[in-house]
Amino acid sequence: MGENRRILFKLESTGAEQSVDVPPGESLLEAAKRAGVALDAPCGGSGTCGKCRIKVLAGDVKGGQSRHIAPQEFADGWRLACESYAESDIAALVPDTASAWQRSIRVDGSDSIRGNAAFRELLGELEAMGLKPDSGLSLTRLALDPPSIDNPMADRERLLQKLERQTGMRADVALYALCKLPSLLRQADFSVCCVLRRETAGLTVLDIFPGGAAPVIAGLAVDIGTTTVSALLVNLLSGDILASASAGNGQIRYGADVISRIIESGKSGGQERLRRAVTDECLVPLIVRLCEAAAIPGEQIYRAAIAANTTMTHLFLGVDPAYVRLEPYTPAFFESGPLSAAALGLPLHPDAEAAIAPAIGSYVGGDITSGVFASMMFKKPEISLLIDLGTNGELVLGNSEFLMSCACSAGPAFEGGDIGCGMRATDGAIEACAVDRKTMAPQCTVIGGQKPLGLCGSGLIDLIGELFRCGIINARGKFVKEGNRIRRDEWGGAAYIAAFADESADGREICLGESDIDNFIRAKGSIFSAIQTLLASLDFDYSVIENVYVAGGIGSGINMRNAIRIGMLPNLPAEKFKYIGNSSLHGAYSMLVSSEAAAMIEQTGRGMTYIELSTHPGYMDELVAACFLPHTNGALFEYIE
Amino acid sequence: MGENRRILFKLESTGAEQSVDVPPGESLLEAAKRAGVALDAPCGGSGTCGKCRIKVLAGDVKGGQSRHIAPQEFADGWRLACESYAESDIAALVPDTASAWQRSIRVDGSDSIRGNAAFRELLGELEAMGLKPDSGLSLTRLALDPPSIDNPMADRERLLQKLERQTGMRADVALYALCKLPSLLRQADFSVCCVLRRETAGLTVLDIFPGGAAPVIAGLAVDIGTTTVSALLVNLLSGDILASASAGNGQIRYGADVISRIIESGKSGGQERLRRAVTDECLVPLIVRLCEAAAIPGEQIYRAAIAANTTMTHLFLGVDPAYVRLEPYTPAFFESGPLSAAALGLPLHPDAEAAIAPAIGSYVGGDITSGVFASMMFKKPEISLLIDLGTNGELVLGNSEFLMSCACSAGPAFEGGDIGCGMRATDGAIEACAVDRKTMAPQCTVIGGQKPLGLCGSGLIDLIGELFRCGIINARGKFVKEGNRIRRDEWGGAAYIAAFADESADGREICLGESDIDNFIRAKGSIFSAIQTLLASLDFDYSVIENVYVAGGIGSGINMRNAIRIGMLPNLPAEKFKYIGNSSLHGAYSMLVSSEAAAMIEQTGRGMTYIELSTHPGYMDELVAACFLPHTNGALFEYIE
């Protein structure tokens, strides 16, 4: 046995340094995990995804060479952390791009919130259903008589007496408001403005402000995705969005999919590590940034609504998800009553409650029940299909009479995971792409209009669809043409260069290799075969489907025609498709602004049924057939040019 | 200006060391306060009480000589911290006896709980009123069907379905129980035992155990006195006491009375310092010790009930008490809804609720409303007088028709504060004493049967009563005889030696000086004059009083005859007096075991009226007249020998 080595990680993003001792045989990725240094590793450290890049600054490192590291980069000290081992004490730079959550906390103020229009539309739909914004919170102004020697009634009782007279309801004062009460009453000459919450037993005064103030009553809507966490700060009285933000899920260093996370959570201390990775490292800074953008303190967030898949919900609540993946696939809970946001570790008002979207099974979680609500498919007479392209794919088929769901392990390809040049649909992502059949040159649309950094899901669909349309790749995704955009490497693999080093934003080539295409084909195949199986189980075919709602972080630029061309979506007329973005977040928003909507989502979830695909006869055959471009049964896609 | 000095405090109790830098002119007591070193200073650092003794081990100290330090002690390095200043870096020993809370956390297991009989009697009285132990908590056993592939319902929903069928009530699972649920269900073969709490909206599953377990459902009753904190661990289903404990209130280093504490809380960070002094330093270790004694974890304490005076309640909740002492004497709250024990910093079950006894005014707090309940005077037709001899004195006069209360600032003498040799009624305290008229020798009864350490309240009453009866002191409390038990010091004061150095437990003389007697006479005078004023305000005299309940930490050995002799209690037949101990803790116990009792205490509080003595005409004259042994109007005590 050799001796321990000391590793010093320097974070490019913050300049912070962190050290850890490693025993011989432990990779630098493992060391980073133990040190709490956030390094993305969607492939779980198997050397395939190429995301865990670090730059060795001092000391000797063994290994780390990879097709993901160009020779010049290798000479400059770049290594894959998962395949590198310290031969001496070393210092290594962790670049911004190696950590999704550190790199890309993205905050928009209310003026520039993308999709603000979508939420306004949703608000309109809620109102059309008779659901006005009503989260149980309200603002009431009270003018009290000041105390005197003849009337030395205590502040709390003075306040409640007035409040109960004014509202006709019993009321109580929460501890936080009680602590503010004596000095605030006197500063404000006994004229105050109370933030109230309606409860079963009466009203609770959550907060108190001077009578002349117009405090914002804010709420927090969150979607905890396996790859990405998104959050909205909302004015609860109007439904207006005050700020929005998203970041990578810090758990990604433990692997891209929920199964890797469940396995990690079974290790000693793993559950708490994963809870912290999403809460302390991700949600807490997101909330801080949202509050900064909206210029309100966290204490003014009085309610939260959270949608996530079943495993993410378990880990966020600190509940063991082990039995989610063990037969008979039993989660610890489908629903949960309102929980204390403070107990969940969120820096909101100490008495804020968090509503959690209900799950219906181990692999159909609150992200889907809230998505079903946001799509409004649950109240339409015609049959709709909801496809949520997250790290897993989940499908729901149904209408106001029935709702049937299933899940398939599509992997993180639609969110850019498991793809060398993949990234989330944020600034720098190629979101659409056409390829010239002759020159093979691409014409790309990049989010934010800048030079490209990588490809998001919609860009991948376009590029693979175009490469196939142009005959550059075959039905198995293998390159069958040569040219200046095609490069073959020493391992025999080929890749398409979507951007040369001098065309990209960070000076690194953006190229799509055969293993990337392979990963993507498996992902799209699992979606398509799931749709086929779901329909077949009901003796339906495509023709019954009136609406296809595509949700998820794949990018709003998704070209449905190309998605059909590669055999990912069913061959239906274009007007039946609608990209609805992050429907999980839309559902969380609905739960947040309307308690009735929250109750409705719970009710809808109870009525949904679930098909377990892995044990469903025929699914595996469907999957194998779908792992071609577009499919072994070309007839399914015959009208596509 | 001189330079800063470094002070190293060594704690005799734990061996711990703590350092702090002091600027010139800062006393060692101030330095100890800043360093968080617990030194009692009931006189607030004015040099009069003699409690803040430290022993200088190294370095030079200026000052600290005092009548409280014998010449030999001074030579050995003993000083009063409040009057000592560092001339160099120094090291000082903090003896156990210098810190009430460190010295005297006292825990009794259930076998040896003093006063256990009193609680059994109280339980009997509650039952006679139709109040069975019912704190809303119960234990229910459930046998669930294990999940299967055909019935993969989540654990929570599986549990709740069975529970709702069995009880006919809606139910929810608290987060703590949810976290335990998946592994426990499987360990226990789906046969479990649930701890339930009844709420307005239904049942909450607070905790879960294997079906065969018989977990204790424990509750915590607390009396937070200005000087002493007492707590009981109670079996909530039977009402049995599992363990009891008491300790000095850590806030005592900021002064003995509530006014000093309010002033300290107004300083920067003072409120939080005081909250920590009682919670982190005192209640938390008490709870830990109680749990050890009863061999249960803190998480099995599901409910708490707390009684305290108005200022202590404010400080415990973290609410500014400033307006308690400013005209028009308005507390921030009289009542509070059930509060989260976790939010109050108590290491109980995370969902445990704490009920706080209601106050009725700035100086009549929850200790008194709960005392009124414990005495049962509020439901008797005859008129009773409750006298609570805490750090303040509070009185309640009344019956089932009316209850009138007042408070007087008696100071801490009855609990041994402000008296050089004073101590609480714990082991080593002289609780009763007779003096031989000829030899002047005392005959003492010591709690625990050991050698004496000091005098508790009842011992002080006896000794002063005896010294007066024997003509050793006069009506002004001055010594008028000489003898081997009487010593005159260089400052002209005289003292009575109750125990010579070789007779005491710690080798220090126990002596009662004229300034001690003076403090005691002011304390007893303020009680007596308050009784007089209360009666006069109703045009009553003594004859209407059928029961006198004496409560507080004065000690169960109180000799009512001697208390009358010195003019502290009214001259009524002995059979009308009853010492009821810590009635505040008895009330907290009642609130804990019976939710109905808690509601009744709230109702009783709302019906009580309060007289402000300080503005009451005639009170000052009464007080002056009562500051003699026994009184300027001897006729009031004429039947006493």
Image (tube, coloured by chain):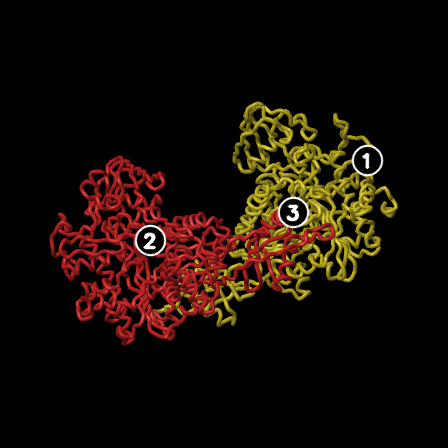
Chain colours: A yellow, B red
| Residue A62 image point, x, y percent | 62, 24
Give me the residue at 59% from left, 36% from top: A33
| Residue A287 image point, x, y percent | 55, 49
Q: Quadrant of the N terminus of chain B?
A: top left
Label 3 near label 1: C-beta < 8 Å?
no
Most extreme residue toward the bottom is B539
Within 10 Å of the Cα at label 3, are there few (<14), some (14-19), or many (20+) other Cα atoms? Answer: many
* Residue identified by numbered label 3: A311
Give me the residue at 79% from left, 35% from top: A440
The disc, 1 or 3, on the residue closer to the chain's N-terminal end is 3
Query: Relative to residue B356, is residue A374 drawn left or right?
Result: right
At mark 2, the secondary structure is helix
Q: Amino acid at mark 2?
A: Glu
- The CA span between labels 2 and 1 is 81 Å
Q: Amino acid at mark 3?
A: Thr
- The CA span between labels 1 and 3 is 40 Å
Q: Is residue A230 visible?
A: no
* Residue identified by numbered label 2: B264
Q: Is residue B604 visible?
A: yes
Q: Nearer the viewer, residue B627 or B28?
A: B627
Query: Any mark on residue A408, and which?
Result: none
* Residue identified by numbered label 1: A472
Against A507, is A599 above or below? below
